[in-house]
Structures are given as structure tokens and as C-alpha cells.
Image (spheres, grey):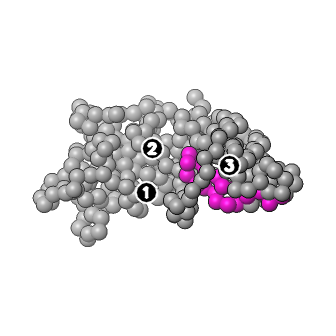
Amino acid sequence: MRNPNNHSNNNACTGISNHYLQVKSFDAFFWYCIFIPLSILPCGRRPDRYLERQAEFQINFSNNMVSGRIYDYYDTTKYVKLSFTGTYNPLSRRLLLTEQNVLQYSIPADCIPCIKTYELQYLNDGKDEILSGEWKGHIVERQKNCPPGKIILKKAVQSDFPVDIEQTDSLARIQEFLHVESRTKDVVKTVFVDVPQIKIELYDNAEIDNDTITVFVNDKMLLYHQRLTEKPLTLYVNAFPGIAYELVMYADNLGLIPPNTALMVITAGKKKMDVFLSSSEQKSAAVRFVYRKPE
């Protein structure tokens, strides 16, 4: 864990970065900043009291649209987790990020989260990849503005916090009350890809016999009671480097011809492959995906 009291860099950030010679769009990666002098967590009755903190940005890029999570934190036990969306302009290399919702928080009782908008410039000096810019925002559930500030972020390959799998609100509500029987997990294959965007298509294998499945990725339910047919059930995963993404196919039934079988077609950049899955009432087929960025 990075030391929140290490201020030796004074508004500079540290991290490990893979370098690009030309950047027209981004992969998925972590951004984090070690130290920002002025916090955005107003605390207590004094309006000028703020908690010094760090920040980690987990950014997914899809074409010129961005989304992800931001952690504002003093340490990994005192934090605010927020979702954000935004845009990237490849000509000016500028990002506009807007926080949408406070997803989770664990902060002192007299601190209040701030919803922020960031205007950031991407820079690559051949050694480091940096986002720098400014923010402005407002205090949650109040009209009062947070004091604006400046931020510098350096690209990193490791996170201090878990990486979320994107899940719709409706599926999250279903999963909250869903009871799934415990079954043995059969890892059929580990797939290594060299691009962060992974497309997964699931078809019924051979004869269509009313097989239905529920699919989890890293324990997040992404498909619920979906019937396998000749038309694909399609999922997209935006992968961060070095993190294993495990897809589990849970058989809701065995169809007319047991067991429950599926053809998985994986597309990642120029790579395309087929994987055959078979799940039963005793075991669930699984496939692991790992994104390894090219040197």
C-alpha cells in the first residue's frame, strides 16, 4: 500500500507505465495519484477543513467514450468510491470526466463526499504517461460547491482496490436475492489476449434443445436465465492488465439432451477462437481470460 503521509514528491505521482510511441486512443488501465495537497472531502463544521487524500482512477476506454471508477481515499479503509463517464478527444488528447454516483464510502462521520468534473490533458514524454488538469464540483445533497483544485495522475499497472465488473442495476437486484446451488467449477481453458476489449458470444452447441444458462464473470451475474440458440448471447469485457477474469456458465436446466452445452466464440483484436463448454447439475464450465499488454 502506498504511504499517504509520503509527501516528498509534492503534487507529483508515481507508478509503473508501459510506453507508447503514438497514442490515438487508450487501453484500459489504472491511474492513481500519490498526493494532492487540497482534499475534496469537506470535514467538520469548519468550511476550511479538508482531509488530505489520494486518488485512484480505474478507466475503461471504448472508442472515444470512457467510464469506470474513482477512489478518493486517505488509506484503503477510508475512501469514497464513485462511478464516472466521459469523453476523450484524440486530436487534443483531452478527457472530460464527470462523476455520476457515490457507490460506496467509508469516511469519518464529519466528512462529506464531493461530486466532481475533471478536465484532463494526456501527456506522454516517452518515459511516463500522465493525466493532468483541474476539477470542480459540489458537495453531495447540497448546493455548496467544493473548492476547485489541480490534479496530476501517472499511469499504473496495479490497483489498491478491487476492479469492478460492470453490471446493470436490474441484474444486481436479481443477484442480491438469488440463491445459486454450489457446484464444482471446471476450468476448461485460460485464454491470454493482447487487447483489453474481449467479445464473448455463446451459442447452443449442435441441436437447439432449450438449454438455458446464467453467466457470471468474477462472481458478477451478467446473464440470467438466457436460452441458448443459433443466435449469440453476447458479452463484452474490458480487461485490465494482469487481472484474471473468470466466466462461469451455470446450467439452469439440461435441455432436452443433457448436459447443457454451448459454443463460446471469443474475439479479442485479431485473435478469434472457439471453446466448447459443458455444464451439468454437478459442475459449471469456466473460462479464464488474462490481458497481457504487448511489450
Relative to residue 96, is residue 33 drawn left or right? Answer: left
User: Who comes first in sequence, dot 1 or dot 2?
Assistant: 1
Q: Position of residue 197 (x, y in %)?
A: 62, 46
Q: Of tags 1 and 3, which is closer to the observer?
A: 3
Q: Is there any visible trace of residue 89 in the rendered image?
A: no
Most foreground residue, 159 or 228: 228
Identify residue for label 1.
Answer: 83
Q: Is there any visible trace of residue 189 in the rendered image?
A: yes
Looking at the rendered structure, the number of numbered marks drawn on it comes to 3
- Identity of the residue drawn at 68% across and 38% down: 186
Most foreground residue, 160 or 89: 160
Dot 1 falls on a residue whose secondary structure is: strand
Identify residue for label 3.
Answer: 249
Q: Position of residue 277 (x, y in %)?
A: 75, 44
Q: How far apart in space, not on screen, are marks 1 and 2 (Cα)?
A: 14 Å
Q: Of tags 3 and 2, which is closer to the observer?
A: 3
- Identity of the residue drawn at 13% across and 60% down: 45
**Category of crowding for the residue at label 3, using alpha-carbon neighbours closer than 10 angstroms: few (below 14), some (14–19), many (at least 20):** many
Relative to residue 31, is residue 188 drawn left or right? Answer: right
Q: Is residue 100 above or below residue 81?
A: below
Q: Position of residue 7 (x, y in %)?
A: 23, 35
Identify residue for label 2.
Answer: 162
Dot 2 falls on a residue whose secondary structure is: loop
Range shown magenta:
209-226
